[in-house]
Image (cartoon, rainbow, N blue to C red):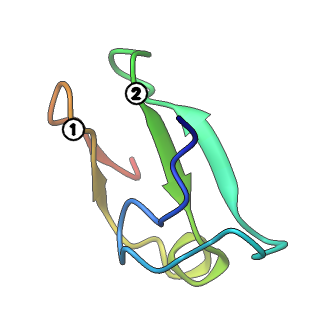
Amino acid sequence: MEQKTCSSCKIDVVNDPGRARFKCPSCGDYDIVRCIQCRKNAVKYTCPGCNFLGPN
């Protein structure tokens, strides 16, 4: 199932044109979703699988 909330701030990003979705850069098993505000402000996120902390 597609994640529809930001991995950092947990807001709904369904209609957010600046959102990003990518696989965890460490384990590659989980999708990381980022809203435009968290991307611009480099807010940290944690992978739910391997606890990787980004952005790095």
Q: Spot the residue most to the left.
A: 51
Task: Name the residue type under label 2.
Answer: Tyr
The picture quadrant where one finds residue 12 is bottom right
Q: On the rendered structure, is 51 left or right of 5? A: left
Q: Residue tagged by mark 1?
A: 48
Image spot of residue 7 (x, y percent):
39, 59
**Residue placed most toward the observer, 12 or 47:** 12
As helix, strand or loop, the secondary structure at mark 2 comes to loop
Image spot of residue 23 (x, y percent):
52, 28
Label whose residue precedes the other's in the sequence (2 or 1): 2
Task: Name the residue type under label 1.
Answer: Pro
How far separated are the C-alphas under marks 2 and 1? Answer: 7 Å
Indicate whether 24 appears above or below 42: above
Image spot of residue 55 (x, y percent):
40, 52
Give the residue drawn at x 62%, y 72%: 13
* Residue contact at pointers 2 and 1, CB within 8 angstroms: yes
